[in-house]
Amino acid sequence: MNKKQQQDKQLLANIDKAAAGEKLPEESGLDKDTRAALEMTREMAAWPKSPSKEFKAQLKAEITHRVVEQQKRTSRNGETRNTVTFCAVRPGSLPSPVSGR
């Protein structure tokens, strides 16, 4: 195994430890990208395991609205198929999936 492969293997092991909440050995020798990856892992591990109730409710309302609008369009066009098309959600139209954000 070459040096790059060893570094990658060590990074993955450190990410697993950080995600599990374990303390890592000295991090001062790590490069900037590795430290950033570990910080992001720690932050993500601290997030709640499921979306907030507000996010779920808003998502359900948005999807229901889209289904109703699609049904209206298909009935106006004389189509009888029950097809639903989901488009991308507008940025900022849903609350954060994580409470307190």
Image: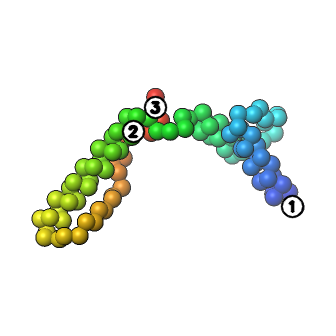
Task: Provide the residue designation for mark 2.
Answer: 55
Q: Mark 1 packing: few (<14 Cα in 10 Å), some, or many (20+)? A: few
In the rendered structure, which disc, 2 or 3, sits on the residue that comes first in sequence? 2
* Residue 98, horizontal then vertical, whole percent: 47, 35
Amino acid on which the number 3 mark rests in the picture: Ser
Image quadrant containing the N terminus: bottom right
Q: Horizontal and vertical percent for residue 7?
A: 81, 52
Q: Amino acid at mark 1?
A: Asn
Residue located beneath label 1 in the image: 2
Q: Earlier in the sequence, mark 1 or mark 2?
A: 1
> Which of these two is toward me, 14 or 60?
60
Q: Amino acid at mark 2?
A: Phe
The quadrant in which residue 57 appears is: top left
- Mark in front: 3 vs 1: 3
**Contact check, label 1 and label 2, Cβ < 8 Å:** no
The CA distance from mark 2 to mark 3 is 8 Å
Which residue is labeled 3 in the image? 99
